[in-house]
Amino acid sequence: MTDSSDFKPLKTWSHLAGQRRRPSEYEIVSTNLLWSTDKEVPWELAPGVHMNQWYLKYRDASPLKHSDWNAFRDPDEMVYRTYNIMQDGQETYVDGLLDEYNANDHDGGLNAAWIQQLAELYTPGRYLLHAAQMGSAYLVQMAPASTIVNCAMLQSADQLRWVSRIAYRTKELSLAAPEAGFVDGERGHWQGHAAWQGFRELMERTLVAYDWAEHFTALNLVAKPAIDEAFVRQLGSVARREGDGLLQQLMDAHQTDNARSRRWTKSLIGFALEIDGNKDVLGEWVTKWAPLGDAAIDAYCAALPNADSAASEAKGEVEAFRADLGLGR
């Protein structure tokens, strides 16, 4: 019989014990948490079960390879606890904006033409952001490391927050302009207005890009940058010119989340590019998806009032972002 005194208890999780320093909160709660990635059959079910085959094909057999995906780290080392603390402050700030502008009857002072633009080009955006949120949620399910999952999960939460804020503003605007079609008209604009059809195609195709890494490429390197630059930045700029300071500041606050998303995206791309062959894989996917992103930007920006350079500016920013990753076309 083995004497129990022969076993020396570890002071932390075994995968962190060898680093000779106290692990951070981020390392403890974010690393090496997926138990479906270290065996030939991902899930403890019969090998032929559809779920096993899905993960084997779209995660484990992805053409984007790395010997240790678990070594990836979020540059912000964000965890659920710190995310909630940070976003509580963000939500308080946004609540303050809404209260301040409502106290001054902001919506009552908007002109009729701009109200119509908001009904067509802003409030239907909740469909767009919900599609992006669904894409991020797919990455949560399919990414090959818990540190990637964590980033995608918080990105998904960001997008859901802004879906909620657009829904809130939709109701407020409906009270100020009941004849403009708010609340009831957004689905029709999303499905039929020319401004949204490029984004509809882009997001519908992204949601059926099942390989986890191609999905990440389509979402975080093409779709989300296009949304950030056309819908968030360019619409925010138009709002400023139209005297809609509330929408401008809401879009500025939205960009804070977008910047954090781009940081972890850049870090993951750099991590992947450490492996020979991955640049070619990513480059082929960018070449495949980028035209859809450009078309979405063109269609949306063409509908913005008095914004002749909006599309070129938005596409230029997206290209600069990808070039910074080493993946420019």
Image (cartoon, rainbow, N blue to C red):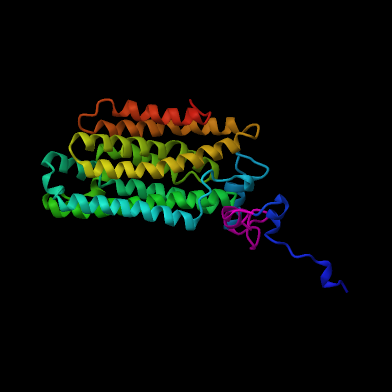
Residue 317 lies left or right of residue 113; in this view the side is: right
Residue 263 lies left or right of residue 228; in this view the side is: right
Corner quadrant of residue 244: top left
**The furthest residue to the bottom:** 1
> What's the residue at 20%, 32% (across, down)?
305
Residue span colored magenta: 23-50
Q: Position of residue 45 (x, y in %)?
A: 63, 63
Q: Nearer the viewer, residue 137 or 195?
A: 137
Q: Position of residue 153 (x, y in %)?
A: 48, 52
Residue 287 shows in the view: no
Corner quadrant of residue 290: top left
Q: Nearer the viewer, residue 318 or 86?
A: 86
Q: Is residue 94 above or below residue 121?
A: below
What is the tally of numbered marks visible in this picture? 0
Q: Is residue 258 shown in magenta?
A: no
Residue 264 shows in the view: yes
**The furthest residue to the right:** 1
**The furthest residue to the front:** 21
The rendered magenta stretch, by its main secondary structure, is classed as loop
Q: Is residue 112 above or below residue 310?
A: below
Q: Position of residue 329 (x, y in %)?
A: 48, 25
> What's the residue at 41%, 31% (across, down)?
318
